[in-house]
Image (spheres, coloured by chain):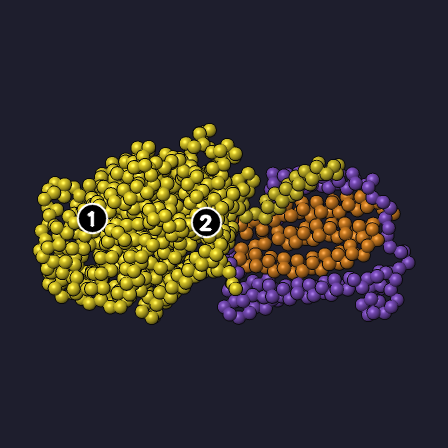
């Protein structure tokens, strides 16, 4: 049940190959246009520089202060994602909150959810 | 000092505010809306007088207030609201706001004292009516005029049908609305024609449509005409189309049938409709765009002939009516016929003059009739009246002044204006058969007018009371007598603003004030002067008896003699203690007149016989128009039924479509941008 | 030094593999993994061009995308749970009841 059958698969493969062909053609076609890579100084660690910048230690050689806000926002986004994951995993059942740690929200007492008519509910309760 | 011109919009907006206040204030207002209306119209009157004075000092102007649509490309029309304040419009502003104010005051006596229901609705209607008419008067372009023209029609519908619980008024209101709408239909087509022809509908200025039309006729400008039609022919057609609206509103033959029925409305409303607003709108429109009409001799002749015919035709019907207001209704139709006759025969000033004097004396007569109706406890049958002279002295004397003015007896206001109309028609008509015919009909209408007017006066006020109501009439209060007195004085003296015959006979210069006023003597707007119109009009003046003075004297003598003849006949027949119904002796003719030449029946017959046309239009509408609409909808229904299959709800399909779309886009961009 | 076009081709290949997974799999969890592959293809591009132009923004953005992927998985897992509750399965083809 995890895979589609033959014809769908063939069309998917065709579409994906076409996309790849286009992308690859474009990438290789643009090969002449690229100059030599600039790169970063080989003996400088970017991670270290970020660390210095975070604690305002004036040892950095690469200017990374401008990205600190971005890192903080990343941290916030991850936090929100974690909270959202926990919230979504919780399940309200008849007013009581069932813990997120039950087996995928399966109702142990009322029997297997899979045995019920799949569409008898309008949505998530 | 603040310029008066800045307050012109307020003239229109004040009554509109009173309309809004009466609409939402309902029964809580003092005198249920009357005071607000009086205050608003009094404010309008004061502002109008101020503007009048400033125009007298040369401050005529045209200003655009609001552009509400702008064309694009080659059709660069702009549709605007603006004000055109010149001697003509400011004169009309004063007339309208004065009559409206007096009607509001009179309504205190006629409506409030009689404990009518729903008075806020009544005063709201009056306010809107006044505001629409004032807006119409200041309009500086044809489209704006048309909009307010329609508003005036709407308000007349609302007010005529004020007593909507009775059977008569709603039906009369519908009739007024439909008949005038029939004329307005042509007017609308005319407005569109003016726009397509000239690309503008402004009344004044070098870019206005009368100026462009004049230039086009002189070959100095080119205008669009349908199918390469001759320019002058096309102008005649456009003029006649707009004239359709005028004939409907000003109750000219054959669209006059709504007006007598409009008497079903409250009497003050009748006064407002007949004197200053609704009916006057048509004549005012012709005067406003007179520069366009004078360019077309055919249209002018038609206007004059229709006017002359209506004047006589309506006057004959007024002879046999039993009800006070019915007589006045037919006299209104007849008098507006005179104005049309004047306009058509080149007497621009004469028409405006008669419009002015008529506004005063007809408002006076209607309010006087209203006073009589109050006294008679709303019985309008003249055969139940009689002998009211001693019971209602103020009403009697003012009504008499109005009647003398209406009949055209020297030296009352109506004499001067009517005499000038007939004089203009005579001197311009001596080598124009149509105008001459119209003149003859106008002249014949004079004795008839005098006869029915004084038949009405004698039946109402003289002789012995013919019913118990007339023996013991209901008294009227100051709020009735006040407006009557003001209008009574005006009806006597208004003729003094334009004493042309006196000037010509006695050779005194400068007492023809209205002529000077409309001739931009004290400043005005270029191209809108009576002098300019006189240069354009197709007529030449011919004099009888070898000169101007004898012609003036002969014309005045003829009309005055005929008027006095009619009066004398009425005197002999009806100024007796117990008059008989002499009109019965007319026999079948009376039936014919009493039934208005069966005009109503004729129109019903026409309506019945054109039902198949309407049926055809209905079939066309149901079949073709609706068919196209339904076809479009069924095509889209069918295609959506098919196309919605794409929305399978399966995520993979959507993703596949996205992939294909992305690939296509990339290929297209790549081909365009040369990425490969 | 590896020329940038090879990174681009690699990124395109990984993207297409992820896309192929999305097009063919029916299990919602495989979907999440495939989406992860596609995101990482984008990250490869970002890092490659960061190196190419010597600009740190690309690397920062790569970090951002990784955080985004984490958030996306969190939400995605939530959706998968709801899917399972309502349809008793994690087959995405079953969740087609809201079409027309």
Q: Is residue C69 left or right of residue B634?
A: right
Residue B357 image position (x, y, % from top left): 32, 53
Q: Which residue is mark 2?
A: B520
Ranked by sequence position, the earlier of labels 2 and 1 is 2
Residue A111 image position (x, y, % from top left): 52, 62
Is residue B65 positioned above or below B30 on the image? Answer: above
Q: Residues within 10 Å of mark 1 (few under 14, many from 20)?
A: many
Q: Residue at horizontal 64%, vertical 39%?
A: A10
Q: Nearer the viewer, mark 2 or mark 1?
A: 1
| Closer-to-camera residue (A56/B110) | B110
Q: Residue at horizontal 64%, vertical 54%?
A: C29
Q: Secondary structure at mark 1?
A: helix
> Chain for mark 1?
B
Q: Specify the colour of chain A.
A: purple
Q: Which residue is mark 1?
A: B564
Q: Residues within 10 Å of mark 2 (few under 14, many from 20)?
A: many
> Chain for mark 2?
B
Q: Is residue B94 left or right of residue B408?
A: right
Q: Secondary structure at mark 2?
A: loop
Q: Can residue B534 be spotted in the picture? A: yes
Q: How many marks?
A: 2
Q: Specify the colour of chain B.
A: yellow
Q: Residue furthest right?
A: A43
């Amino acid at each position: 049940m995890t895979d589609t059958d033959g014809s769908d698969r063939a069309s998917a493969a065709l579409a994906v190959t076409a996309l790849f062909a286009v992308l690859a053609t474009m990438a290789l076609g643009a090969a002449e246009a690229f100059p030599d890579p600039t790169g970063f100084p080989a003996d400088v660690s970017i991670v270290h520089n970020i660390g210095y910048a975070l604690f305002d230690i004036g040892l950095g050689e690469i200017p990374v202060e401008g990205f600190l806000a971005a890192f903080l926002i990343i941290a916030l986004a991850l936090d929100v994602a974690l909270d959202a994951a926990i919230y979504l995993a919780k399940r309200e059942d008849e007013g009581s909150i069932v813990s997120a740690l039950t087996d995928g929200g399966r109702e142990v007492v009322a029997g297997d959810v899979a045995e019920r008519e799949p569409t008898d509910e309008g949505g998530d309760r | 000092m603040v310029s008066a011109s800045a307050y012109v919009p307020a003239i229109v907006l004040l009554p509109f505010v009173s309309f809004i206040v009466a609409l939402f204030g309902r029964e809580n207002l003092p005198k249920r809306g009357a005071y607000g209306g009086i205050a608003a119209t009094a404010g309008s009157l004061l502002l109008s007088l101020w503007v009048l004075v400033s125009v007298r000092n040369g401050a005529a102007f045209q200003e655009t207030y609001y552009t509400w649509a702008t064309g694009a490309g080659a059709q660069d029309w702009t549709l605007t609201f603006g004000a055109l304040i010149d001697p003509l419009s400011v004169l009309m502003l004063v007339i309208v706001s004065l009559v409206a104010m007096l009607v509001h005051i009179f309504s205190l006596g006629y409506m409030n004292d009689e404990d009518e229901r729903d008075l806020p609705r009544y005063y709201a209607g009056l306010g809107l009516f006044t505001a629409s008419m004032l807006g119409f008067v200041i309009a500086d372009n044809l489209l704006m005029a048309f909009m307010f023209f329609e508003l005036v029609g709407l308000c007349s519908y609302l007010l005529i049908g004020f007593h909507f619980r009775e059977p008569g008024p709603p039906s009369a209101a519908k009739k007024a609305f439909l008949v005038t709408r029939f004329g307005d239909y042509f007017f609308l087509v005319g407005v569109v024609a003016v726009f397509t022809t000239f690309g503008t509908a402004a009344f004044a200025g070098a870019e206005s449509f009368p100026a462009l039309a004049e230039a086009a006729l002189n070959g100095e400008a080119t205008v669009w005409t349908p199918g390469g039609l001759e320019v002058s022919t096309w102008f005649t057609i456009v003029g006649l189309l707009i004239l359709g609206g005028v004939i409907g509103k000003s109750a000219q033959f054959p669209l006059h049938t709504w007006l007598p029925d409009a008497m079903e409305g409250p009497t003050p409303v009748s006064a407002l409709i007949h004197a200053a607003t609704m009916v006057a709108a048509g004549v005012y429109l012709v005067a406003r765009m007179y520069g366009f009409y004078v360019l077309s001799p055919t249209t002018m002749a038609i206007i004059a002939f229709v006017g002359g015919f209506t004047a006589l035709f309506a006057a004959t019907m007024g002879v046999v009516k039993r009800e006070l207001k019915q007589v006045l209704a037919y006299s209104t139709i007849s008098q507006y016929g005179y104005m049309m006759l004047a306009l058509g025969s080149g007497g621009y000033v004469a028409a405006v003059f008669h419009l002015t004097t008529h506004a005063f004396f007809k408002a006076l007569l209607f309010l006087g009739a209203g006073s009589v109706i109050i006294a008679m406890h709303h019985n309008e049958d003249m055969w139940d009246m009689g002998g009211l002279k001693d019971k209602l002295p103020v009403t009697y004397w003012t009504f008499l002044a109005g009647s003398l003015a209406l009949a055209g007896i020297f030296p009352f206001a109506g004499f001067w204006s009517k005499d000038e109309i007939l004089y203009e028609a005579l001197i311009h008509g001596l080598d124009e058969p149509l105008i001459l015919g119209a003149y003859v009909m106008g002249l014949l209408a004079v004795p008839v007018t005098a006869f029915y007017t004084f038949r009405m006066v004698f039946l109402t006020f003289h002789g012995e009371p013919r019913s118990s109501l007339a023996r013991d009439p209901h008294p009227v209060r100051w709020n009735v007598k006040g407006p009557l007195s003001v209008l009574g004085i005006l009806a006597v003296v208004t003729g003094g603003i334009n004493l042309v015959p006196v000037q010509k006979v006695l050779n005194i210069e400068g007492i023809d004030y209205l002529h000077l006023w409309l001739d931009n003597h004290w400043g005005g707007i270029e191209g809108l002067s009576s002098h300019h119109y006189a240069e354009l009009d197709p007529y030449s003046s011919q004099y009888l008896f070898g000169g101007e003075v004898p012609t003036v004297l002969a014309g005045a003598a003829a009309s005055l003699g005929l008027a006095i003849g009619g009066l004398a006949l009425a005197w002999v027949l009806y100024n007796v203690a117990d008059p008989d119904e002499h009109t019965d002796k007319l026999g079948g003719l009376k039936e014919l007149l009493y039934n208005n030449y069966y005009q109503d029946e004729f129109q019903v017959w026409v309506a019945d016989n054109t039902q198949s046309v309407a049926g055809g239009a209905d079939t066309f509408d149901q079949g073709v128009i609706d068919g196209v609409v339904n076809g479009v909808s069924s095509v889209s229904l069918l295609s959506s039924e098919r196309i919605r299959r794409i929305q399978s709800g399966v995520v993979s399909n959507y993703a596949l479509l996205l992939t294909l779309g992305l690939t296509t886009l990339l290929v297209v961009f790549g081909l365009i941008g040369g990425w490969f | 030094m590896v020329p940038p076009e090879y990174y681009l081709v690699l990124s395109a290949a990984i993207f297409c593999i992820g896309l192929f997974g999305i097009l063919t799999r029916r299990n919602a969890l495989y979907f999440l993994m495939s989406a992860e592959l596609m995101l990482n293809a984008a990250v490869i591009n970002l890092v490659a061009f960061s190196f190419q132009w010597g600009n740190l923004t690309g690397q920062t953005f790569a970090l951002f995308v990784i955080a985004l992927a984490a958030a996306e998985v969190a939400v995605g897992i939530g959706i998968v749970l709801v899917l399972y509750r309502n349809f008793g399965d994690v087959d995405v083809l079953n969740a087609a009841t809201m079409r027309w």
